[in-house]
């Protein structure tokens, strides 16, 4: 992990709402989203939405430290890492592509299989838990995360909600994201459509707190 670990970010509600409108347009005009050219490229221009990802860690909230392509020495790299300054509350984010084929594939044996893209993204997040556990006593780790045993939540954003087109698919998705953990590391699964709805809800609450609704 090379210093400085994070970029300081001052969250702006008005800017976040403008970024959310761009996200909505992206989803409305594209059935499929390419991981690098559309997802990562756009989130590089949406720092307030990146900071808002910290809400998936209930003890973090909106982050004030963010870093894209954060290296977990020496093996892995997150697409986005969000932290609250002065705490050990962290959110690690992996973005995959978004299409009807990113979560499930036709298995040809009576039940759909988890898509290769999903298994790749899920395994990436699980591997972070190994790396973080392996390097937790190093000085760089403690510096970057605020302690040897930080409160970390991992988030995998993948696919579109339209791919959860049957009750069995939806139930398997819900079961996996509610039941599966790696060690004590919480893993959150969310489609891009669910991500938009979460952003919209969080910003609505933020507006109410600010007396703007």
Image (cartoon, rainbow, N blue to C red):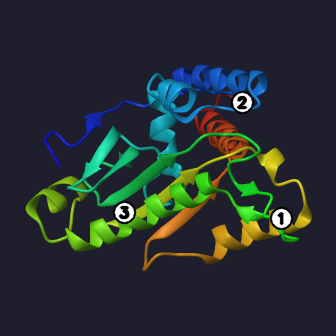
Number of marks: 3
Residue under circle 1? 108
Q: CA distance from mark 2 to mark 3?
A: 40 Å
Relative image position of residue 65 (x, y in whole percent): 32, 41
Q: From the viewer's perspective, is the residue at label 2 or at label 3 nearer? A: 3
In front here: 89 or 209?
89
Rendered residue at 37%/68% (across/down): 129
Identify the secondary structure beneath mark 1: loop
Relative image position of residue 180 (x, y in whole percent): 59, 75
Relative image position of residue 143 (x, y in whole percent): 15, 56
Badge 2 or badge 3: first in the primary sequence = 3
Rendered residue at 82%/54% (across/down): 164
Say whether residue 96 is left or right of residue 21: left
Badge 1 or badge 3: first in the primary sequence = 1
- The answer to whether 21 is drawn above or below residue 144 in the figure is above
Q: Which mark is residue 11?
A: none
Identify the secondary structure beneath mark 2: loop
């Amino acid at each position: 992990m090379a210093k400085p670990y994070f970029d300081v970010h001052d969250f702006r509600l008005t800017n976040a709402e403008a970024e959310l409108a761009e996200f909505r347009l992206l989803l409305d005009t594209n059935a499929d989203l390419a991981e690098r050219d559309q997802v990562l490229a756009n989130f590089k221009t949406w720092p307030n939405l990146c900071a808002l990802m910290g809400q998936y860690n209930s003890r973090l909230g909106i982050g004030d430290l963010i870093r894209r392509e954060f290296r977990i020495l020496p093996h892995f790299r997150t697409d986005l890492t969000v932290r609250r300054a002065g705490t050990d509350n962290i959110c690690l984010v992996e973005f995959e592509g978004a299409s009807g084929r990113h979560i499930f594939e036709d298995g040809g044996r009576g039940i759909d299989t988890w898509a290769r893209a999903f298994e790749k993204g899920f395994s990436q997040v699980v591997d972070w838990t190994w790396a973080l556990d392996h390097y937790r006593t190093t000085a760089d780790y403690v510096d970057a995360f605020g302690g040897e045993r930080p409160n970390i939540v991992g988030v995998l954003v993948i696919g579109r909600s339209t791919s959860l087109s049957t009750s069995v698919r939806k139930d398997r998705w819900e079961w996996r994201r509610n039941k599966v953990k790696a060690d004590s590391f919480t893993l959150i699964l969310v489609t891009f459509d669910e991500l938009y709805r979460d952003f919209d809800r969080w910003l609505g609450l933020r507006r109410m707190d600010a007396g703007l609704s």
